[in-house]
Image (spheres, rainbow, N blue to C red):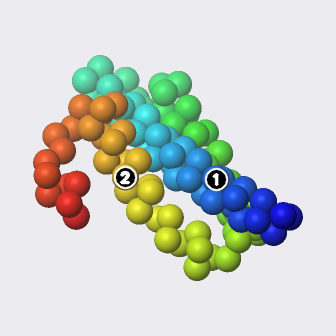
Amino acid sequence: SRVKMGVVFAISSQVIASGCTAFGYAIQKQAHDLAKESGVSVVKQCRWYFGLLTMFFGLPLSYVSLVFADQTLLSTLAPVSIIFSLMIGKYMLKEDVYLKHYVS
C-alpha cells in the first residue's frame, strides 16, 4: 500500500541516483581527458558542466530517498554505484576491466 510504494520509490530513486552520480563522474573524466589532449581548460568545456549537473541531480535524489525508507535498507544498495561505475568505465571510458574487478 502506501508504505510499500514509498519504499519502492526510495529504492528506485536510490538506484537512479547511483547511476546519475557514476555517469556524471564518467562525463567529467572524459572532459579531463579531452582537456589533456586539446590543451583547452576543463572549465571551458560543456561536457564538464553537464557531468557536474548530472551529479548534482543524482545526489539530492539520494537524499530524498532517505525520507521514504530507512537508511539500513538503502545502504545495502551502495554496491549498485560500484557496478554502475564498473560498467560505465568499461563501455563509455574504454577502460580495461579484469576478472578481479568483477570478483571484488
SS of the residue at dot 1?
A: helix
Q: Is 37 situated left or right of 53 in this image?
A: left
First-in-chain label (1 vs 2): 1
As drawn, the label of residue 104 is none
Instruction: Give the crowd class for mark 2: few <14, some 14-19, many >=20 residues within 10 Å.
Output: some
User: Closest to the observer: 46 or 71?
Assistant: 71
Question: What's the residue at 53%, 72% (across, down)?
Answer: 75
Q: Which residue is mark 2?
A: 83
Res. 68 image quadrant: bottom right
Asked which secondary structure carries label 2, the reply is helix
Residue type (three-letter) at the residue carrying disc 2: Ile
Asked if the residues shown at circle 1 and circle 2 are in contact, with their CB atoms under 8 angstroms apart, the answer is no
> Residue beneath label 1, please?
12
Q: CA distance from mark 1 to mark 2?
A: 16 Å
Residue 29 screen position, x and y as percent: 36, 38
Q: Is residue 1 left or right of residue 49?
A: right
